[in-house]
Image: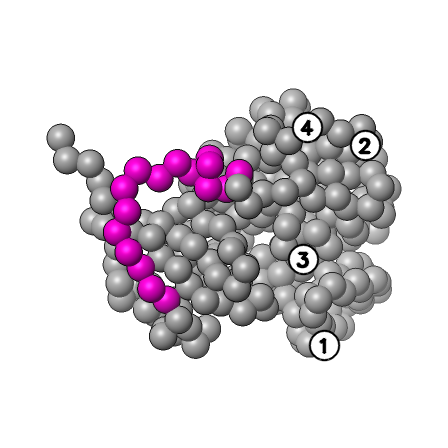
Amino acid sequence: MLRSQYLEFTIFCPDNTKELVEAELLCAGFEGVWENDDKLCFYVKEEDLDIEVLKSILGQYNLIESYSYKPIENINWNAQWESSFDPIRIGDSCIIRAEFHEPTNVPYEIIITPKMSFGTGHHETTFLMAEVLLSLNIKNLSVLDMGCGTAVLAILAEKLEAKSIMAIDYDDWAIENSNENLAKNDCKLITVQKGDADFEGHFDIILSNINRNINLEMLEKYASGLNKSGKIILSGFYSHDIPAFENLANTLGLKIAFRKEMKDWACLIIESC
């Protein structure tokens, strides 16, 4: 029986586009992604590679001349991401770690195995979202985690005593990985479902760490799904994008109640006026 041949891609990528490029390539079927200094490394089975799709994605970020690849065999995915996944400490109360890290004595410890899903807490936007969530009192509130990735934010919401959490993603790997991470963290209040913009229900807290365009497109939908006195927490975009959200919020009868920035990335809390 022939063994699948994998191709290893190395992409030189600026920090301010890494997360966006990662997300698009993962959705296109690339596997085993991790950062290595100024590079992103991906894998794909040779028979699954669509070079035109790759070029189309990289062309959006002016990276068409920035990649190389070589054939390899037998990827040990766990070894690959374990070598680059250090625990993330958020303030004094939260640590995001993998199973192979030593347990810690903090109020909120989250165990994540990212596999091919997106969102370990290392990127500034995930860090900002978690930091803002930790600053709020969400006990007994309902939460929507849209584009949940590894479900790290949904898991944190349960640990913060939210009464119910809906986690939604359109990607099959994200759904599978989220459910595995829920089991690792003994979560009981989170429902994971595959879906997109057509979510149903009303929530006290809506979390959306996606990207600028999708967050702008979804803001009206989020507003219609928000309970009275609820909060929409957004990230996945740059600080210079804040005026676009402020203008749209104003037209929807919303306001930016809080903003936080980290290395040119932004996180907003949006509420009703």
Q: Would you place residue 38 above or below residue 128 in this image?
A: below
Q: Describe residue 214's horizontal placement relative to residue 130 as left or right.
A: left
Mark identifier at residue 102: 4
Q: CA distance from mark 3 to mark 4?
A: 24 Å
Is residue 241 covered in magenta? Answer: no
Q: CA distance from mark 3 to mark 2?
A: 21 Å
Indicate which disc, 4 or 1, sits on the residue closer to the N terminus. Answer: 4
Q: CA distance from mark 2 to mark 4?
A: 12 Å
Q: Quadrant of the C terminus?
A: bottom right
Nearest-to-viewer mark from 3 and 4? 4
The residue under label 1 is which amino acid type? Pro
Counting other residues with Cα less than 10 Å from the Cα at mark 1, is it few (<14), some (14-19), or many (20 or more)?
Answer: few
Can residue 159 be seen here? The reply is no
Nearest-to-viewer mark from 4 and 1? 4
Indicate which disc, 1 or 2, sits on the residue closer to the N terminus. Answer: 2
Residue 113: horizontal and vertical position, in percent?
A: 55, 35
Q: CA distance from mark 1 to mark 2?
A: 37 Å
For the point 53% across and 30% down, the residue is 179
Q: Which residue is mark 1?
A: 243
The residue under label 3 is which amino acid type? Glu
Q: Secondary structure at mark 2?
A: loop
Residue 124: horizontal and vertical position, in percent?
A: 67, 57
Q: Which residue is mark 3?
A: 124
Residue 45: horizontal and vertical position, in percent?
A: 27, 47
Q: Which residues are magenta?
A: 67-82
Nearest-to-viewer mark from 1 and 2? 2
Q: Would you place residue 162 above or below residue 131 in this image?
A: above
